[in-house]
Image (tube, coloured by chain):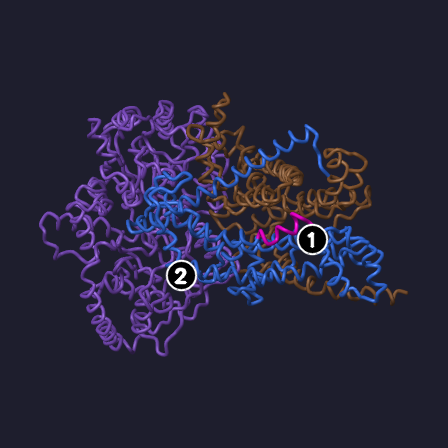
Chain colours: A purple, B brown, C blue
Amino acid sequence: MAKRNWRLAALSGAIVLMLAATACGKGDTQGSSASKESASAAPSATATSSQETKQEDGPLTKYDPPIEVSTIYWDSAPFKFKDGESLDNNVWTQEYENTLGIKLKTAWSFFGSLDQYIQKMNVAIGGGDLPDFMQVLPAQYKQMAAAGQLEDLTPYYEKYASDLTKDILNQDGGVQLKASYVGGKLLGIPHIGSTIDGTPLLWVRSDWLKKLNLPEPKTIDDLITIADAFVNKDPDGNSKADTYGLGVSNELYGGGPGLEGFFNAFHAYPGGMWIKDSSGKLAYGAVQPEMKTALGKLQEMYKKGLIDQEFGTKDSGKIQEQLVSGKLGMFFGQMWTPLWFGDGKKNDPKMDFQAYALPTTDGQPVFKQSGFPTGMYWVVKKGAAHPEAVFKLMNVSEEKGYGKTADATKYMTDNGIEFFKYAPILVEPPRKNLNNHLLVTEALNSKDTSKLNSEQKSIYDTIVKYQGGDSSGWGYDRVFGPTGAFSVIDQYVKNNEVLVTEYTAAPTESMGKYQSTLDKMEKETVTKIIMGAASLDAFDQFVANWKKAGGDTITKEVDDWAATK
Amino acid sequence: MTTRKWIREMPLHVMLIPTVVLLIAFSYVPMTGIAIAFQNFYPGHNFFSSPWVGWENFQYMLQLPGTLQVLYNTLFIAVLKIVANLVVPIVMALLLNEVRKMWFKRSVQTIVYLPYFISWVLLGGILVDILSPSQGIVNEILKAVGLPSVYFLGDNHWFPFTLVATNTWKEFGFNTIVFLAALTGINPSLYEAACIDGASRWKQTLKITLPGLLPIIILLATLSLGNVLNAGFDQVFNLYNASVYESGDIIDTMVYRIGMGDGQYSVATAVGLFKSVVSFILISVSYLLAYRFANYRIF
Amino acid sequence: MHYRTRSHTVFQTLNYAFLALLSLSCIFPFIHILAVSFSSKEASTAGLVGLLPVHFTLKSYQFILDKPEFGHAFVVSLKRVAIGLSLNMLLTLLTAYPLSKEVKSFRFRTGYAWFCVFTILFSGGLMPWYVTIRNYGIMDTIWALVLPGAVPVFNVILLLNFFRGLPKELEESSFIDGAGHWTTLWKIYTPLSLPALATITLFTVVDHWNSWFDGLILMRHAEHFPLSTYLQTIIVNVDLTKLNSVSPSTAEMLANVSDRTAKAAQICVAILPVLLVYPFLQKYFVTGIVLGSVKE
């Protein structure tokens, strides 16, 4: 489970805000003059507040003389900068230096895939080559805690976290913050994530539905009817049998095409989920009997040709290819997917996708699974000269990002350049994306944009343009628009149908040892059963093997953990 | 006498000083880290201060389900690769040696060397298309000849051979170079003499060219024994998938999976040590055999 | 040396045909990548590009020119090859020469040989390697990329075997003329080993040009990455399915990151230098040198 979870917010990382470059082409004269003004205004405002607290060291007290704090930057692609700015000199480093007297130093930076970043970090951690503070994965958090590499932040949290910081860290009811304590000590600040953004949806090509006169997918039987029609009734009208039914990638689970949604319809919860079983004990989702029923259905679909016969060798990149080339019309995936295959709209302007709530098999409510949302922890190296500095930095980041003095065009995004990425510690409010959808939809109805912040305004503008016929905003409309993905997620939340994993701590010792082996067994069995290379009963054998190969030990550890919670 | 010998050999020692210094600094010093194979290594500690656990890390690997299968896969794939990577380049060098048109020889050499520079990440995506049973060109050819189509990347019977074939294809051009260089070392007067004796081209290849290449063949064969447990991480990682774990999972992919979940420094070191010991034994034995029976020092 | 037998003609025809086909199979992926680099992003993301560009455009090459990272990395790689090659060749010669001697003329050769070979068999693993290099204080510098592999033992063994193949009389006559070991190495051995040296040069250049893992681990700042490391970071697909929750802006960014045309263009430009080196070195092992004439 850990594997999946740490990858989660890992990438969403510090990413908080978006601004389509198209949306803010105009009005930069206004933006730049405004940012100049606030640049001179902001420090003086905070300067007064820090003078008041001069006697006692507090959340925003300035260091005099200034101190130096080192950290690590990571993202999937290199940051973009305005002319003259750089990693060591930008709006955020200036802000920290002016208000806090903290000079940020880049210990190292890396732009590439998460796996590569982990390799780099593991070596650095193993060699004890750490900056003052950094973001680490749950497994590393646990390991560093055990090795005594981390500073205890418990006393500093009370004294130095501002009210806004505390508020943001507790927005989920304090679940994730509580889960970060190791042996009663807060050794890291959790990167609070959203439990709703990652819930599965069913995406279907609505233009094909209309063309072939098909029902909306309310049940799994509907889904099979649709898949059948997509495969056999030539939805793209090229008289070739070259379209696919239900998109499945060889990774099986995840945000792109992932089968979680299909399994959820059968009340099965794979992909690292821990659920409460009928006796109230914690149980691993992927080895429950409901899985078998769902697998039987998938095997049947594969046999009928409703799933790509070669899905075993097709990764998510190939699925993206099928979507962009208009060969695939249905898959389970998360809310952001239209932005990922938006090129398809350019290839075929008729293409349209609609997000649907997960179908049912029995009319019972379908719960949508969500992994544990804390993907990373900010930790402070043991022996760092100023352990409290990490909270001070966070206070300023949250204030300028989401507080009363927030200024999105100065600190977050402008002209397609994402400034918020330079902030080494920043947590976005978990409900942010859903709120954006709700407010934007409201504004679209009322035509009143006064309640929108700059981020929401840019989404609004993009969608208005899309409605006016500019197809480049299609992806944003499908995610945030009135009938977009979040309108479905809003229903999930209202109906209380989001099921968060019950295990919320860093990986246990046996997970570190056995999880990867168990994951491999699971993936192999599920793939083989779907492809018909193994009989459905192979699932029972898998469950037995799973228990023997460490699954029982892990379950016991998880139960022990639950007992102490 | 001994002093004179010392003086005579002195320059040779001097020549080796930089090498010895660099190897000690960058190879032997880090080797002390092998100690952590027998520890439960704590990150941030030095290589001797974590608790000692004896053979526990080795036992852990052995008791994981499927380890024996993985070991078998690794050996099977690696040995086939070693053989193919020797035989194909030798044949290739001999064939090129027969080409008389210089422009053709040069062009072929340059072109076959190209695939070596395309990484497996990229090649992986291309191969999935080329080898697809429904649309791939390879299966189109098979079908045209009347053969059944094959799921090269999704069938456990075919997968290891697909790995070997694609790896050989990618690297033979590069590996051929060393044999081409060796061919230039064969004394042309030998061929002239053979010609006068009326030996056919084929006879010359057997009697002059191959024996001329023999030392380099033996040398490369011996050194490649060191790879008997290296089945090629990059390639397997980019080509395998859950349906062929059974035949395609190798030691390196296994260690990678384990290490990614949890930075298992000690386990990775233990596996590395195991591989080193096996290579060391194989290479030492072949070195000694070559010396005993052929009085030839490989290095 | 002319063969007019019928079987030989048949063989030659088949040989040419076979080599031509083989070349075709090797050049195919490269042409595909080239075609992708000249295609539009939409067409390549849809997988529509085969061997010819679809919607021809030079955009991705424009993209490289605009990208500072590519240029930085290119320069680092050139530096690495220049320093690494000189160092490697020098040390290869200096090591191979003494080791090519017989035991009777250099008593310790076998000890030294095993001392070298041992280092390719055993290593302390990733982390000790990292810690050592950090302790030497060369992290994040070009020296971290060239010093740890300064003695290419594999190449040393190749060269020492080649040296042994040289006629013994050469060495003897050189000594009789009063030359010492140093002169013999530079004046006799080196010029006679050009095919082997050309081969080793090629191996070394390619090796330095292609190595990416050391750059990934030993370089602290992205702008110090050599080209191959940089390429590796952009080529490896950010695997979206492995992420539990992705923000919309990440998804959009990753859709751009996965732009295959830009990757293809960068790969093509990155392969160029190694391709250009090849023809220069090729002549040494296509034609070969005639040892007989030196021998007399």
In the rendered structure, find residue C118 and report the number of the disc placed on it: 1
Judge by depth and name the residue closer to the eye, B278 or A91.
Answer: A91
Q: Element under label 1?
A: helix
**Which amino acid does the dot numbered 1 rest on?**
Phe
Read off the chain for label 1: C
Secondary element at tag 2: helix
Magenta span: helix, strand or loop, mainly?
helix
Residue C277 percent location from the top left of the image: 56, 54
Which one is nearer the viewer's eye here, A51 or B194?
Answer: B194
Structural distance between the alpha carbons of marks 1 and 2: 42 Å
Q: Is residue A255 visible?
A: no
> x, y (%) of residue A125?
49, 58
- Residue drawn at 45 percent across, 57 percent down: A145
Give the image location of residue A127, x and y in percent: 53, 60
For residue C77, above or below residue B74: below
Query: Residue B103 is drawn in which quadrant?
Result: top right
| A400 vs C40, nearest the viewer | C40
Q: Which residues are magenta?
A: C278-289
Q: Residue at (79%, 34%) from the top-left corner?
A: B198
- Across and down, in percent, residue C227 comes to 48, 56
Q: Can you identify the residue that label 2 sits on?
A: C68
Q: Residue at horizontal 71%, vertical 45%?
A: B216
